[in-house]
Amino acid sequence: MFGALLAYGQAVVIRHRAAGGADLAALAAADHWADGERDACARAGRVARAQGVRLVRCAVVGEISDVTAASGQGPFRAEVRARAGPPQPAPALAPLPTGSFEQPEHPAPDQPPTPPPAPPSPDTPGPRHSPQEAPEARLPPPG
């Protein structure tokens, strides 16, 4: 039982090493995409070796790199594919709901309820606008 547990642990470590090496190699290749695919993949290979993994495959198309790295041997071999490049634009979000976000109209138990505000009377002056700020000034002349 202990031997099986050790073998499983070794397999997990090898898989994580391959994943980390593939991620870093893909980032290195994507960072040097402007140098061309050959130079970008050479950089990815150096990064993979520094991480203790082998670069199995590397492709750079535009600013996107796609690499596969391997770690381990025999039954404890793991291959992991990783891609890197610029972020994609975020999808459009749904608009937020409009309306008031007021406190609920439940008064505290020891306080009387507050009456709603009175509507403005017709002879109360409203906001004053200069002719440039008045909404009517922005409309085109009729005709």
Image: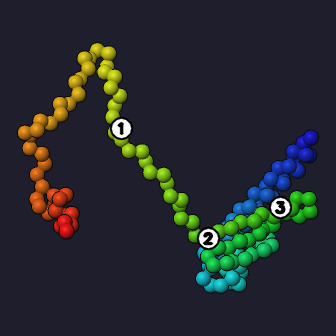
66 sits left or right of 123 in the view: right
> In x, y percent, where is residue 119?
18, 34
The amino acid type, in three-letter code, at marker 3 is Ala
User: Residue 76 bears which disc, if any?
Assistant: none
Residue on which the image places disc 3: 78
Element assignment for label 1: loop
| Amino acid bearing label 1 | Phe
Q: Secondary structure at mark 2?
A: loop
Marks 2 and 1: CB-CB under 8 Å?
Answer: no
Q: Which residue is pictured at 31% across the width and 21% down the height?
A: 107
Q: Nearer the viewer, mark 2 or mark 3?
A: 2
Up the image or down, 136 lies above or below 114; here it is: below
Q: Determine the residue positioned at 78% across, 74% down.
A: 57
> Which one is earlier in the sequence, the residue at label 3 or at label 1?
3
Please identify, in this view, whether the residue under mark 3 or under mark 1 is nearer the observer. 1
- Quadrant of image for the N terminus: top right
User: Which residue type does callout 2 highlight?
Assistant: Gly
Please name the residue that numbered disc 1 is placed on.
101
* Disc 3 to disc 1, C-alpha distance: 54 Å
Q: Quadrant of residue 123?
A: top left
Of the residues under marks 2 and 1, which one precedes in the sequence? 2
Q: Residue under circle 2?
A: 85
